[in-house]
Amino acid sequence: MTNFALSPGVVFNTMPRMDALSDTLTECIDLVRKVGAFQLQHFRKMPENAEDMKAVRETVSFVDVESEKMLSDGLLPLVENAGFYGEESGKSGSQELVWIVDPLDGTTNYLSGLDQFSISVALVNDGRPVLGVVYKPSTGEVYSSVQGQGACYNGALTRPVHPGIEAKDALFSTGFPYRSADVAEQFFKAAAEVLTLGRGIRRSASAALDVANLSMGWHQGFWETDLQPYDIAAGMLMMEENGVLVTNQNGEPYDMFNDRLMVAGLPKVHAELLKVIAKNYEL
C-alpha cells in the first residue's frame, strides 16, 4: 500500500515518491491484464440457450459490472485513502485522491463482436491524473503513464510521431453525439469541415483508445462532446505528458469534470481544429 502527498494543498501522509508510483503502475497493468482476460472469455460468445439480443446484453452487463468489481477490489488496496469512481458503481470514498475507472469502454463494440474496446484506469489527485493505464484486451496493447515520466506504449517510452505535423496532413478522430441531441446538428456541420481539413476522420467508439492513440501521435486531432471523466482520465495524462494540447471549445484548458466539449491535438493541428469547432458549436 502506498501513501501519497500528490499536490500542494492536498496532503496524504507523506511526500510523493515516484518510484512508489511506478510500482503501483506495474501492479495496475497486471490487474488490467487479468480483467482483460476475463472479458475475452466472454467475448463473441452467446450465452447457453440464448436466442435473442436480450440475453447477449445481459451477459455484457454482467461482464461490465464484474470487471469493475475486479478493478475496485484490486486497486483500492494499492493506495491508502484513495476513493473510487467507476462508470457502473459511481462514486465512493475520497474524490480528492481517487481511482477513476471505465471497466469496458466500447461496450457497444463488445456487444456486437467488434474488438475495439478497452479498460481505462487513472489515479487522480485534486482533479489531475497522476497515473494512467489504457489496455486493449483483444491485442494486449498497453498505454501507460506516470506524471512527469512520459507516456509509454507496451512499456517503451514513446513520443508522438511527426510532432510538427500540420492540419492538412492530419488524421482526425471523434465520437458521435448519440446521447446529445442538442449538439447533433453542430457536430455534423463541424465534421463536414474537418473532413476536408485533413486526411479524414475515424470513429472507434472507444474514447479511451482514441485519446491514448492521440497521445502517441497516431491520430493528430480529436474532438467530442459529453465525455465522462472515466472515459478520458487516463488518456488526459498521456496527452499532457506528450505535448498534446487539450482545451474546450473556447481554447481554455479542458476540465474533464465540467466542460462539455474536448478539442485535442498536436500543436499546429489543434490550432486549426479549434477554429472549426469554435465556429460551429454553441454551448
Image (cartoon, rainbow, N blue to C red):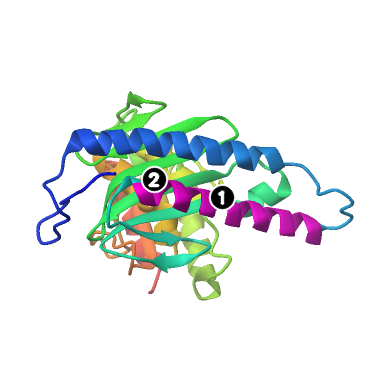
Query: Is disc 1 surrounded by few (<14), some (14 to 19) or many (20+) residues within 10 Å?
Result: many
Q: Secondary structure at mark 2?
A: strand
Q: Is residue 178 above or below residue 175?
A: below
Query: Is disc 2 surrounded by few (<14), some (14 to 19) or many (20+) residues within 10 Å?
Result: many
Reply yes or no: does residue 59 show up in magenta. yes
Q: Is residue 1 left or right of residue 154?
A: left
Residue 237 locus on image (x, y percent): 30, 46
Three-letter code, disc 1: Ser
Quadrant (top left/top right/bottom left/bottom right) for the C terminus: bottom left
Q: Please tell me whether mark 2 or mark 1 is closer to you in this view.
A: 1
Q: Is residue 203 above or below residue 218?
A: below
The image quarter containing residue 279 is bottom left
Residue 110 locus on image (x, y percent): 66, 47
The image quarter containing residue 251 is bottom left
- Looking at the rendering, the stretch of residues picked out in magenta corresponds to 54-77
Identify the residue under disc 1: 67
